[in-house]
Image (cartoon, rainbow, N blue to C red):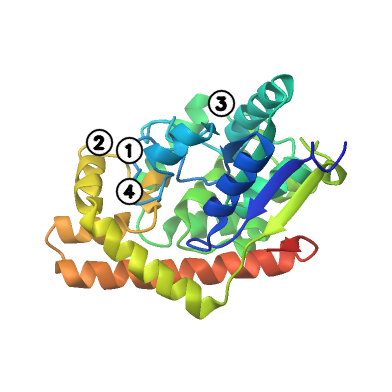
Amino acid sequence: MGAEQAVVLIAGPTASGKSALALQLARQRGGVVVNADSMQVYAELSVLTARPSQDDMQSVPHALYGYVSATEPYSVARWLTDIAATIERCRAAGQCPVIVGGTGLYFTALLGGLSPVPPVPADIRAHWRAVAAAAEPGELHRRLLALDPEMAARLDPADNQRITRALEVMAATGRSLTDWQRQPGRPLLDPADTERIVVQPPRAEIHARCDQRLDAMVEQGALEEVGHLLKLALPPDAPAMRALGVPQFAAYLHGACTRDAAIMAAKLATRQYVKRQETWLRHRMADWTKA
């Protein structure tokens, strides 16, 4: 596949400017901007996830943005299915897919595939979700430690979503999730057929952009957006409830802190997230081209 036909992958921390680069390349190459951000898939989260503007989406085709309800279960496996169909449509139409986002796991799955973990039966999933909803802090991790010490050692004791997933898999298959993860998956794309770009300005510049953007989000209705999300009465560990700014602004809307304190907490959480993204990029995307 020639360079002009290669699928373009653009990764980078939040507020790094990767979406602007994706828009530019899609315009130049007659392409489609395709979302690879786990929070920008949600219909209810437009402002807080900095989803592309209506003007941008009308000027250049975009795909996989805001098309899933926060009430629906969503995973990297579903994203892979959706993006496979999107790439196929782009190729059939002679369009260049420009895949952009900050979710490193999505790119890893795209280029390396997913481990073949069997589906978890609905009754087992429902059982462990109910256990998780009623569990005291640390209780789930203690349960996993007793059943699957190897997986427990890899997970943050506060990460109930991933701990619940590990418990479900153990209950459904009798095997540790680590066993399944050691089995290679089938890549959707050959790295040789891609143009891979990392956008990574200096950290101080990203922090300043993040702060400015969060202030702008508040002016654009971020608090109201969180208020609408809360009306859905989602479980606290639902993915959309963990989007940057949602826990902090939810605390303000529940009267647990002041507006200014919520904004400061959201800015701090964003900086911490940027640091995790930068670590991922450094370790997993060292061979990507730096923009």
1 or 4: mark nearer the eye: 4
| Residue at far left of view | 255
Q: CA distance from mark 1 to mark 4?
A: 9 Å
Q: Which amino acid type is shown beneath numbered disc 4?
A: Val
Q: Secondary structure at mark 1?
A: loop
| Residue at far bottom of view | 204
Q: Which amino acid type is shown beneath numbered disc 1?
A: Glu
81, 148: nearer the viewer: 81
Place of residue 50 in the rendered image (x, y in percent of width and height, measured from the top left)? 40, 51
| Residue at far front of view | 28
Question: Which dot marks residue 232?
Answer: 2
Q: Which amino acid type is shown beneath numbered disc 3?
A: Pro
1 or 3: mark nearer the eye: 1
The residue pinned by badge 3 equals 121
The residue pinned by badge 1 equals 44
Answer yes or no: do the residues labelled 1 and 2 have beta carbons within 8 Å?
yes
